[in-house]
């Protein structure tokens, strides 16, 4: 089973501060890296699907980078807002390249 | 476009009872996943369907869990008999084509199961 790891497990950030967290994955046989945001009482929602080494993607105040050679991706949130409070999940396909394997998530709380 | 529909949203049962969850994926999505998310952990893949065929069920506890996807559309996941450790959120997801390597998965809101 592919091991996708995320750190930190939880994070408390003051409103207005910027923050980032990490997803690591085996660099061999890389296919894609997904980031999802899961707000309480809602469905997980895709933020980014990244496939190329060096990829940088941005959606509003949230951006992500990808390093497939060393096996990590960073998610950045600039100027955190209360609505950013959620669990952020990263996922990568398994060896069959057909199924999503999730990390355990980073639970982000924004203090007003 | 309607999203992935799941029911029920919440279920409380006693151990050794049976329970079933239902999922209706987005129209036209060939791939359907069932995930189990235990508090404090990431979602764990239980079973993956491509149309009405099983692609992967390696982490499905087959002595008590079963799933089917008749006609390649709706799917049901059943637990019989339930154990305390089955308390979790059960998420259904679908994607347009085989695998989700380059395409996102769309999730339902999940069913929160509590076994007492």
Image (spheres, coloured by chain):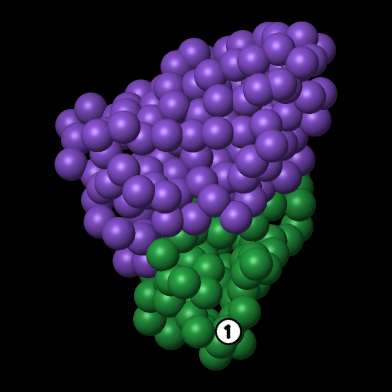
Chain colours: A green, B purple
Extreme-bottom residue of the structure: A69
Give the structural element (helix, strand or loop) at label 1: loop
Give the percent coordinates (x, y) of residue B112: 61, 21
Q: Residue at x 53, y 68 (%)?
A: A94
- Judging depth in this view, the residue of A29 and A24 nearest the camera is A29
Q: Report the residue at 42% width, 34% height from top.
A: B68
Q: Position of residue B89 (x, y in %)?
A: 62, 29
| Residue B87 lies in quadrant | top right
Which residue is at the front of the view, A75 or B101? B101
Q: Is residue B66 among what the camera can see?
A: yes
Q: Residue at x 43, y 76 (%)?
A: A31
> Which residue is nearer to you in this view: A69 or A110?
A69
Horizontal side of A32 relative to A88 (left or right) equals left
Mark 1 lies on residue: A27
Q: Which chain is disc 1 placed on?
A: A
Left or right: residue A36 compared with residue B2: right
Crowding near the residue tagged with mark 1, few <14, some 14–19, many ≥20 C-alpha atoms within 10 Å: few
The residue under the point 55% across, 33% down is B66
């Amino acid at each position: 089973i592919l091991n996708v790891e995320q750190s930190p497990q939880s994070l408390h950030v003051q409103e207005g501060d910027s923050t980032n967290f990490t997803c690591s994955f085996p660099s061999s046989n890389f296919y894609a890296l997904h980031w999802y945001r899961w707000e309480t009482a809602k469905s997980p929602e895709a933020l980014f699907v990244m496939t190329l080494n060096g990829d940088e993607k941005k959606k509003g105040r949230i951006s992500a980078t990808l390093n497939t050679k060393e096996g990590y991706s960073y998610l950045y949130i600039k100027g955190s807002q209360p609505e950013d409070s959620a669990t952020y999940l990263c996922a990568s396909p398994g060896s069959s390249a057909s199924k999503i394997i999730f990390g355990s998530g980073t639970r982000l709380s924004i203090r007003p | 476009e309607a999203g992935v529909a799941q029911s029920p949203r919440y279920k409380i049962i006693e151990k050794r009872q049976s329970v079933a969850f239902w999922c209706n994926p987005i129209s036209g999505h060939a791939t359907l996943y069932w995930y189990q998310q235990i508090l404090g952990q990431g979602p764990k893949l239980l079973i993956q369907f491509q149309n009405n065929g099983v692609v992967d069920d390696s982490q499905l506890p087959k002595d008590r869990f079963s799933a089917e996807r008749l006609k390649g559309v709706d799917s049901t996941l059943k637990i019989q008999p339930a154990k305390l450790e089955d308390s979790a959120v059960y998420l259904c997801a679908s994607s347009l084509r085989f695998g989700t390597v380059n395409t996102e998965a769309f999730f339902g809101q999940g069913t929160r199961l509590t076994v007492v």
